[in-house]
Amino acid sequence: MAELTTRPFERADVAAASALLAARHCADRAREPLLPARFESPDACAELVREATDYADGVVAERDGALGGFLFGVPILRAPDHPSARFQPLRACMMFAHGHAVAASEDPFAVTQALYAALGDGLVRRGIFAHLVHLASADAPLGAAWSDLGFGRWSVYAARDLAPLPRAGAAGVVVREATAEDIALAARLADEEVRFHARAPIWHAYLGRDTAAAVRREIAGLVEGAESAVFLASRDGREVGVTAVSPAAAGPLFTPDRCAYLGQTAVLAEARGQGTGAALVGAALGWARERGYAHATLHFSVANALSRSFWTGLGFRPVLWHMLRLVDERAAWARPPGAQP
């Protein structure tokens, strides 16, 4: 068998890469029918791959002139006060879901190892040590290949249809839509999620103070926007929970058609386990149904056992893993004598 070689991605690779991506998506849809059907077409995938060449670094692996796989990665440099800094590394590379695929005829580990070595070495040399890859949750062979390269599950992108929840109401819980007067209150409640993620064994850095102004602006946009809403839950006259709903804007291959997104969800400790969260989610899903949505998605941390049981208990199922590897920073400078700098 000819040797597997790697090189930078070229525009001439778009057609072959799009065929691999469409084939992978057909297999992903066979396991998860909620995924959008249009990306089973290589032409639809070609639009995504072509766009990726404009903003991401890419490499290909080939054998005997045939494409065995490809991989794109885009550096993400977050400002410390950006809302996403609460949940993601500030300096990272994201290898997004429509930016990689492996030919069915190739060994997933061999191709993935070659691609990641080719792309990742440049990242380490640039001082980017947090590497994230997005993988279909049901693709066990590809997940095993990345796991063998030191990646672990970091967060989940989960989806469900908008069928009414089996337990959407709770005695004593009142849910209402927030107004402009509630923006500060909603932001304070949303901070509870960030505080919870700072606890063991999640250990996210608490950046509530740094991101407070940006989060408040984000929530203001959700409250005041024509295509979004924020809901507040109260018990005994006291506001104890919040959630927000808006159009989904995540990766195209794993976001179902006509899809809403739930975020900023938090319930104070004293109100948990009493149906408060389910009441909030039921209101948000009802809002989405009334506006013609058919599905909903959200993210949660894999290490957050409370969120994991809550969301899966409400019928959300993982469709995408965000897998993370943190490279030892010393690898950028502690190299053997004579090694290429």
Image (tube, rainbow, N blue to C red):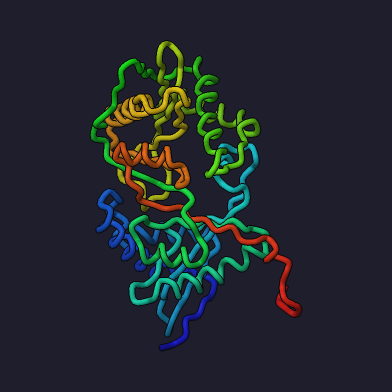
User: Residue at 72% across / 76% down in the picture?
Assistant: 336
Q: Total number of numbered labels?
A: 0
User: Residue at 51% across / 28% down in the picture?
Assistant: 190
Q: Is residue 183 in sight in this rendering? A: yes
**Relative depth, front residue between 143 and 55:** 143
Q: Is residue 55 in sight in this rendering? A: no
**Relative depth, front residue between 136 and 326:** 326
User: Residue at 27% across / 36% down in the picture?
Assistant: 162
User: Residue at 38% across / 76% down in the picture?
Assistant: 106
Residue that sits furthest to the right in the current view: 337
Residue 119 coordinates in the image, percent (x, y) = 56, 67
In the picture, which quadrant includes the C terminus? bottom right
Task: Specify whether 288 is left or right of 322.
Answer: left
In the picture, which quadrant includes the N terminus? bottom left
Residue that sits furthest to the top in the current view: 237
Residue that sits furthest to the bottom in the current view: 1
Image quarter for residue 258? Answer: top left
